[in-house]
Image (spheres, rainbow, N blue to C red):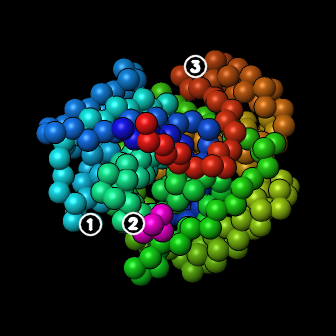
Amino acid sequence: MIKLRVPATSANMGAGFDTLGVAVGLYNRMMIEEIPEGLEVINKNTQSFIPQDTSNLIYRAMAELFDYVGYEQKGYRITQDSQIPMTRGLGSSSACIIGGMLAANIISGRQLSYQEIIHLAATMEGHPDNVGPALFGGFCVSLMDDDKTIIKSTKLKSHIKFAVIIPDFFVATKKSRGVLPSKIDFKDAVFNVGHASMFQAAMLTCDMKALEIGVKDKLHQQYRKSYVDGMEDIFEKTYHLGSHATYLSGSGPTILSILDGNYDGFKAGMEEYFKTNGLEWKCMILPIDNVGAVVSEI
């Protein structure tokens, strides 16, 4: 039996559309074992639905790797207990893909390196900014270049924490990507290159003052805000409570703020704001996960 723990991730960090991501301390825990035949899927978190047939994403990721290495599939028992909310912009699908591929790689004789696995995972996901931190942990800069995926992971100081602000509704990634323009102005591209570069420099040097500048974006958030009622007001409230950078996590609708203190005060302030405005949102303060996916055989 293979036991795995894969962290949640937040991608599209500010100006870093499809390139910047971070792993946070919320997990999908899985146990996967080979059985003589068939497929058994056990979901220990009864508050979330996961497919129990071959459309299950963990199984599909396993099958993708098996096909790639030419391994003849048998039967599998997949047990999942995930804390990561689905379709909220916190990398729930990437956690399943990474977990499934890591397990399949062990079952099939460890034929692939982590670099090969990450490229296979990014190809399946369509972009690397969630699967990178899900596998390697930390703050990741990612890109896909022809036939390879390049991930650079940096471990962050523990005083940097993430306020994950989750609504009571979801937005499908496909729908959220559908509102993005097919072309952008050159000046907007230059804006994002500069701000994404500043954001990276600020994260790597823990320059909290520069984060608020670097997080500004002109590629996706302005188009997606129509799916998140009150997004601009929530952004403003987070900065009033001490956020150094606030952005739409992934394709949303979760909003994430970067903090370096007053964690309890921030959480209490956001909860009071939600209560006052009749919003069924919740706020969690999560640490950085600098480890990434953890795998063991039992």
**Secondary structure category for the residue under label 2:** loop
How many C-alpha atoms fall within 10 Å of the one at disc 2: few (<14), some, or many (≥20)? Answer: some
**Up/down of 69 relative to 291, above or below:** below
Residue nearer the viewer, 120 or 215: 120
Earlier residue among tags 1 and 3: 1
Residue 226 appears in the rendering: no
* 60 sits left or right of 10 in the view: left
Segment tinted magenta in the rendering? 112-116
Earlier residue among tags 2 and 3: 2
**Residue 74 part of the magenta segment:** no
Q: Which residue is mark 2?
A: 112
**Up/down of 115 relative to 34, above or below:** below
Q: Quadrant of the C terminus?
A: top left
Q: Check residue 68 in the rendering and tell me which mark sits there, or answer none.
A: 1
Q: Position of residue 40 (x, y in %)?
A: 22, 32
Q: Check residue 278 in the rendering and tell me which mark sits there, or answer none.
A: 3
Work out how far the residue at label 1 is from the one at label 3, CA to CA, in angstroms.
Answer: 50 Å
Which residue: 36% across, 38% down?
A: 1
Q: Position of residue 155 (x, y in %)?
A: 72, 55
For the residue marked with disc 2, what is the amino acid?
Leu
For the residue marked with disc 3, what is the amino acid?
Gly
**Number of residue marks:** 3
Location of residue 209 by image quarter: bottom right
**Up/down of 122 relative to 95, above or below:** below
**Residue 113 part of the magenta segment:** yes
